[in-house]
Image (tube, helix red, strand yellow):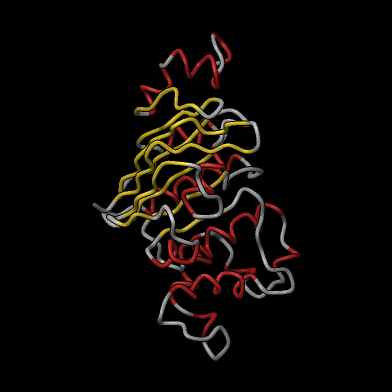
């Protein structure tokens, strides 16, 4: 049962119900996308999956474990990784130090300080593949926005998660960087690694996703392959536009 599944998730904030019985499944070896207009409930669902928000009802199951009542660190220990819509970086620390913090999940890194910690093979590889190697010793606060956006994905992958939830990781990137980032996402996939991708850039979504779920006002209105979703009239009306706009 190496997959992530959310079952009949409901969430209300005050008088507003933002998720109405949402269910979805993400498999290893695939990019499972979650799309929808602003306010659809995508980030709320990501927060529920990763443990930052508790659902009013429903279940979150990962690799045979019921995560519904587990805390964030317990979910991380089971192999669930997460990047955030807003930058969550530690200013005053270098790029390599920020990325190395992701190694805390691994028993192989007992202490953050010490010789060679920032030169761990996983850290070096993450910096290389996300084009951060030349900035490894820079204060993360001095990076351009595009470079800074790559630090968090690098920090997540060095923790060696088996399922990564990415919330708008390509927002603000140039077209060229988005294409390279999409290629990097596909490179993460393996029989023991999967990705849940929340993104507004439809070109990126359609190019990297294996399966797509579509939310609109907290309701799952469609799911399927990229071609199936592209042709779905409800999706075109709610999110992609109609006619020439689509």
Q: Residue at x 72, y 56 (%)?
A: 144
Q: Residue at x 35, y 27 (%)?
A: 224
Q: Residue furthest top?
A: 243
Residue 164 lies, with reference to residue 243, above or below; the image says: below
Residue 13, image x and y in percent?
63, 38
Q: Is residue 125 left or right of residue 41?
A: left
Q: Is residue 168 left or right of residue 29?
A: right
Between 142 and 70, the residue placed more toward the observer is 70
Q: Residue furthest bottom?
A: 115
Can residue 180 be spotted in the picture?
A: no
- Res 7 quadrant in image: top left
Between 165 and 189, the residue placed more toward the observer is 165
Residue 84, image x and y in percent?
59, 52
Q: Residue at x 52, y 83 (%)?
A: 117
Residue 187 lies, with reference to residue 102, above or below; the image says: above
Can residue 173 be spotted in the picture?
A: yes
Q: Is residue 90 left or right of residue 83?
A: right
Q: Is residue 93 left or right of residue 125?
A: right
Residue 176, image x and y in percent?
58, 43
Between 176 and 223, the residue placed more toward the observer is 223
Residue 148, image x and y in percent?
66, 58
């Amino acid at each position: 049962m190496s997959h992530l599944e959310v079952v009949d998730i409901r969430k209300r904030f005050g008088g507003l119900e933002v998720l109405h019985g949402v269910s979805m499944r993400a498999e290893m070896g695939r990019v499972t996308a979650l799309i929808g207009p602003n306010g659809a409930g995508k980030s709320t669902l990501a927060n529920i999956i990763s443990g930052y928000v508790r659902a009013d009802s429903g279940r979150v199951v990962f690799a045979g474990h019921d995560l519904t009542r587990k805390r964030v660190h317990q979910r991380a220990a089971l192999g669930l990784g997460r990047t955030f819509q807003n930058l969550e970086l530690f200013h005053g620390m270098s790029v390599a130090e920020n990325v190395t913090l992701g190694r805390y999940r691994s028993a192989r890194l007992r202490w953050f300080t010490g010789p060679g910690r920032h030169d761990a093979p996983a850290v070096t590889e993450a910096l290389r593949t996300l084009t951060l190697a030349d900035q490894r010793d820079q204060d993360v606060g001095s990076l351009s926005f595009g470079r800074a956006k790559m630090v968090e994905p690098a920090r997540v992958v060095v923790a060696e998660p088996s399922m990564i939830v990415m919330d708008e990781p390509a927002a603000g990137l140039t077209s060229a960087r988005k294409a390279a980032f999409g290629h990097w996402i596909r490179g993460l996939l393996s029989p023991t690694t999967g990705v849940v991708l929340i993104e507004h850039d439809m070109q990126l979504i359609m190019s990297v996703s294996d399966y797509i779920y579509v939310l609109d006002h907290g309701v799952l209105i469609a799911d399927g392959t990229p071609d199936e979703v592209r042709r779905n009239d409800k999706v075109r009306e709610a999110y992609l536009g109609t006619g020439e706009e689509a």
